[in-house]
Amino acid sequence: MYFPLQDIDAAKLNVDDPEHLRIHSLETFGTHDGPGVRMVIFVQGCQFRCLYCQNPDTLDVKGGRMVEISELVKRAVRQKSYFGKDGGVTVSGGEPLLQRSKLTSFFKLLHEEGINTCLDTNGRLNNAQVHELLEHTDLVLLDVKHINDEIHHKLTGLTNKNTLELAAYRESTGKRMWLRYVLVPGWTDQEQYIEEWGQRFTDYKTVERVEIIPFHQLGLHKWEMLNMKYPLKDTPTPSEEIKQKTLTIFNKYFGNVILK
Amino acid sequence: MKTDVTAVPFESGEWKTTINVYDFVVKNIKPYTGNASFLAGPSAKTTRVWETVKEELLKERANNGCLAIDTETISTMTAFKQGFIKKEDEVIVGIQTDQLLKRSMKPFGGIKLVESALKERGLKPSDRVVDIFNYAKSHNDAVFSAYDAEIRAFRSKHILTGLPDNYARGRIIGDFRRLALYGVDQLIKFKKADLANVGGEMTEHKVRLREEINAQIGALKDIVKMAADYGCDVSRPADNAKEAVQWVYFAYLAAVKEQDGAAMSLGNVSSFLDIYIERDIEAGLINEEEAQEMIDQFVMKLRLVRHLRPASYDEIFGGDPTWVTESLGGILNDGRTKVTKTSFRFLQTLYNLGASPEPNLTILWSEQLPEGFKKFCAQVSIDTSSIQYENDDLMRPNRGSDDYGIACCVSYQKIGKAIQHFGARANLPKALLIALNGGREEHDGLQVIKDIPQLPEGPLDYDLTLDLFKRTLSDLARVYAKAMFIIHYMHDKYYYERAQMAFIDSDPHIDIAYGAAGISIIADALSAIKYAKVTPVRNEKGLTTDFKIEGDFPQYGNDDDRADSIAQEITHYFINELRKHQTYKNSTPTLSLLTITSNVMYGSNTGATPDGRKAGEPFAPGANPMHGRDSSGAIASLNSVAKLSYNDAQDGISNTFSMIPKSLGDTREEQINNLVNTMEGYFKHMAHHLNVNVLNRETLMDAYNHPENYPQLTIRVSGYAVNFVRLSRAHQLEVIARTFHESM
């Protein structure tokens, strides 16, 4: 594993310092993580170890900086006029679920200000605290990285069991969800698994949109900066043919597929 | 051509008995709330004329940006005989001279300027023209005969720059709609009545007014002659849509034949013309393609306005702009939108003829604009980067009229009722350096302001620096006001805009439009002094050459009140200082935070500043944050600029915003919606102006290296648009260096 798992510290992340979020960075004009113009908060800390991770600098649960939740609410309010009817705040990462309880209070405060909330997650956890957070989440962007558990494990270091359960849970609540799929040549472009992925979710009524995110090499410099060995250094970006083939398969199962 | 359209009469009103175009518009406008699907492409005639134009434009660019010059004739409305582009296909006729793109001499602004512009191209004015100025005086000569030593020093040391003392002031917008609605005969009748009312005991004001009104009547008579040469009788009102467009264009053409003001705007003619167009369509006289053809050909003519300029002019107004600013959209006081189908037709010209900097299409943005129009505007921005936006919800209540246009780049002007006197701008960072150097200019040490003590050695103290800076600004305001008084007095006397003024009420309200450059440097510099430790580095004369900055400090452009409040405070202070001084014709002082492209020239003339900017580096344009310092994202950057109060800068707060297409969203629909949301968000913060560029930096780099492949590439700079390839290399690089907002 290129970066150690940090179970003990990860557990603390949700408990310690309830007034603060540990964040990596903030984007004020996000248009790629949820609908409309959004303030995107990239939280710090993740326990997936995806081979293609584009933000390896957000993995360390002890990194980043602590920011007062009230300060983040204040900033969101300053940006509210730009959100229009679709936009709002997205929490991405890193893995937001590691700070689920803090995010619940954050999202509650945003709702008091009339601001739409969106959670971009890999579904790492599925428990009562997560369910409470999802109650206050207007839209979930769920990243299902691979449908086959064995490959998922190789690709991310962890099982996809929780992710699939969380998807089923969200579906049961009837609340909005987008699914995301990172298309990596040699890793996630196997036709039979894409079919299986589609079959798994095709009947979900809460899935408004499916996004195919082609693998890119823009995160490379971060790996180099961190002096970490980048396992996918030589992996090409998906060809137009692979992208179109994948799109065609997804289109069989979903009404609204976006190839990013 | 005379066609009977009485089948669909206009709604009557006050406009029938007095000069009141506004009343005509309010009574007859047909607001359009649909989308762009009705629009037509270019007609065959339009395409043929435009092909001819494009060939000539290529020749113009190949010939160093100037196709031909007439050295024999002083340009007036009647000096040149008729000229055509492709006569059989021209639906709207008339060009400035007898040949497309030929430039002419308008020497009453300054004969020396004309001479140097010609000399740079190996030409000289005819002996006759030179001889005239052995007896007559030009504006430029007159101004300098009245300037005092102080003004000259401020000018030569680049503290006051770009003043309209050696070129024509422009900015005055005639209500060109009046020619179409009333015809010359009626307009003269009303002007004569005005003249008769200026009687009794004489004052200087009355004498001047009488002379001006008579000059305007003379202009109206000449317009009749000019139009008659093209076979049109403008002594009577326009009878139909084609005539209305033609008449409005003639009124504008008269102005650009006689004047070469820096910015000569068109106003807000589109929805007025729409009334005639919709009537003709309803009467079955024309179809949509013919309606679009009139607008395409009108707009084409507006793209071809040219003036003779010396090279030095390009430093302050890069890219040969003319600012034929036309304002589209906005809301009427009664709550209806001013958006009509012809608002769409004007925007459609950017597709039918391709992208273009002129006319300078300006959207008067309101939350209440119809959704279909908002989306079409955003789409046009994404596709062409050719249009700008101003906040109608801010200007309408603040300035009091719903019938206004934009003068030059960003300045509100009530149409037909008020004018403005253009005042170029003061260099604020330069003033700060003078404050830090005991009243001396930082390059050669010339004492330009008295009674500013030399600062003690060591790190700068914030309160003391602020105090000295404000004292410097007070003195700067005093000298600036003097210069403006002289300039506009002389401009009226020697280069009066009789053609535009003929279409304006006889004794209009006047704003004197002062300006300031470098507000973002001031905010960052004072913030550095306040929150970090700034120590001047001085040369042997004790003049600052650099500044040592230790520690971090908040920077303007990050929605951080600590820095943004400094920009607010200084703007507020400076306009209040300007308001203390007498003005020519009792005009009302306003202030702009705008630079045109002079931010590059200002930078090269200004030493290192305490914000960390090195000597010679460009300023940020307008009210923009400095390049790369707005690091908290696009919205934080917009929010900072939005904090500047319009009450303190009613002449305009210019913000140029560049983003890469992908940063607006994944799909075209998302990009359009997100750009609409951006505008809504920004203007809800009571911001004033936004230039929108949606471009890849790589496109600009490629255009920089291969200009021949990008003849029509248009970008927005401070308050106007330019053909990128017509900017100087230095300006091109400065544009490329600007902050592009991306999100990855």
Image (cartoon, coloured by chain):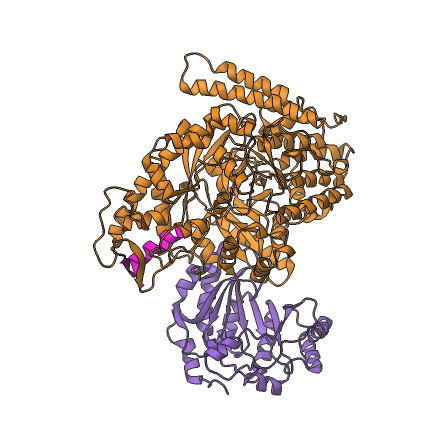
Q: Using the rendered view, name the quadrant where residue B576 is placed.
A: top left
Residue at the image position 65 percent from the left and 56 percent from the top: B709
Q: Which residues are magenta?
A: B519-539
| Chain ID, purple in image | A
Query: Is B644 located above or below residue B668 in the figure?
Result: above
Vertical relation: B348 (above or below) A251: above
Q: Residue at x 59, y 74 (%)?
A: A216
What is the letter of the orange chain?
Answer: B
Query: The N terminus of chain B lies in which quarter of the figure?
Result: top right
Say above or below: B544 vs B483.
below
- Asked if residue B136 can be seen in this view, the reply is no
Quick one: which residue is furthest to the left in this view? B456
Please give left or right for residue B710 compared with residue B291 in the image: left
B133 and B572: which is toward the camera: B133
What is the x, y in percent for residue B454?
22, 50
Percent x, y of residue B393: 51, 42
How many numbered discs, if any?
Answer: 0
Q: Is residue A104 highlighted in magenta?
A: no
Residue A23 % position (x, y):
43, 71
Residues B281 and B599: in front is B599
